[in-house]
Image: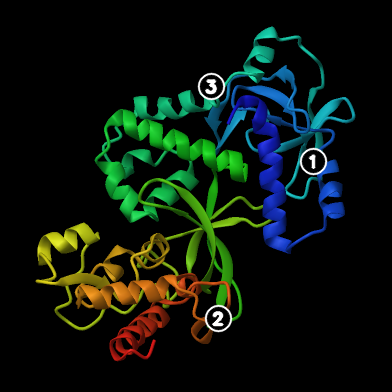
Amino acid sequence: MTLSQFPSRLAVGFMLREVLATGEVSRAELERRVERFKHLAVLRPDGRIAWVRTGRTQQRVGDVEWKDGAFRARGFELGRFYDGRTGVFRLLNDELREESGFPLADVHDDADVISRTLDGAEEAFVGLALSVGKFFSTSPADNLAALREMPAAVVALLESSPEYLERFRYMTRGEQVQAVSKLVTNLIATWGTVSAATRTLEGVALATAEVPVLALSARGVLAMESAAVPVGRAAAVLSGGPGAAIILQRAGEGGGSNSTPPAGPGGMKSYSSFKSFKRAMGPAGPGKEWHHIVEQTDGNVGRFGPKAIHNTENIVALDKELHTKVSALYSSIQYRVTGSRTMTVRDWLRSQSFEAQRDFGLRALDNVRKGAW
């Protein structure tokens, strides 16, 4: 991403979140929504104001710095939209309406030649990356505790992604700076913010809420999926706008009674990763392979915690042939099982509870053994 692409990227992210929250829209409605951005501008990571529709630089505000829970330059905040149609910039809320009506600055062209050159540069988010680096230079980065002064959304993502966190802890100092910088810029470019507030998911008692969940894979890839989450569970909420993303806390870190899967009978041994499990348990045996009854997907590890997935009750040794057949079942489309002609069994299971996934996993093993599936 370039600096010149940043304003339009924010607008596209805003509209995608609207569609996520309200549903599919017609082309005519989409064009009407695009028109709303005609006179809107944003603060770029290099400290300059630029118009959303054209990407053209308008004027310089100042250096972007972390202040009061957000990246700011004077009175402007990174990731927010500003209306400049009246000759002054005014802050807009999450519905693109004036938040206070208070003018922040006059709209003027400062003829900054350097900023015009930066518009075509490929070195995106240089100022923002330097801001991230400043945090690491003022406090040790040996473990997650040292990142408490970083944006809340970044810390929440790392805490809710145990596989990535384990990898992060063993990175060099320079690699950690690079990883966090990438997370910050991706979050701002897509969601318009890196702040997050801890909330309890609300809804009908003893029910589940369908929410957009943001997850970080072991390789550091951000992905969002829709998941059914028990009401009453604590979660970090990223942004307050349309389709606000949810970063789920790991199992056992708060929330309702349904947030943590059953521990299983006494004597069960749990591990922080599959690698740790194999190191302790050794090979599955001649002609056998280890199999997770509740699959070890990034989504499952993030929702239920690694120890609920990598334990001696959830991992069993299967003959290679049987293991291959079970894996093929999960990757296939089974209308009689899922009721869908387009969704795989794995995708169908993704949003279901730990108990439901385990029950299906045991039935799948039994039926595949019998040749019923």
Disc number lying in front (1 or 2): 2
Residue receiving disc 3: 123
Circle 1: residue type:
Ser
Q: Earlier in the sequence, mark 3 or mark 2?
A: 3
Q: Where is residue 175 drawn, in percent x and y? A: 33, 32
Q: Where is residue 131 drawn, in percent x and y? A: 48, 26
Q: Residue at x 40, y 29 (%)?
A: 135
Q: Earlier in the sequence, mark 3 or mark 1?
A: 1
Circle 3: residue type:
Glu
Disc number lying in front (3 or 1): 3
As measured in the structure, the alpha-carbon distance from the residue carrying label 1 to the one carrying label 2 is 38 Å
Disc marking residue 100: 1
Given contact means CB atoms under 8 Å apart, are the residues at marks 3 and 1 in contact? no
- Where 17 sits versus 107, above or below? below
Crowd tier of the residue under label 2, counting other residues whose Cα lies within 10 Å: few below 14, some 14–19, many 20 or above: few
Q: Residue at x 33, y 38 (%)?
A: 146
Residue receiving disc 2: 207
Q: Earlier in the sequence, mark 1 or mark 2?
A: 1
Q: Which residue is most to the right?
A: 86
Disc number lying in front (3 or 2): 3
Report the side of 244 relative to 166 (left or right): right
Crowd tier of the residue under label 3, counting other residues whose Cα lies within 10 Å: few below 14, some 14–19, many 20 or above: few
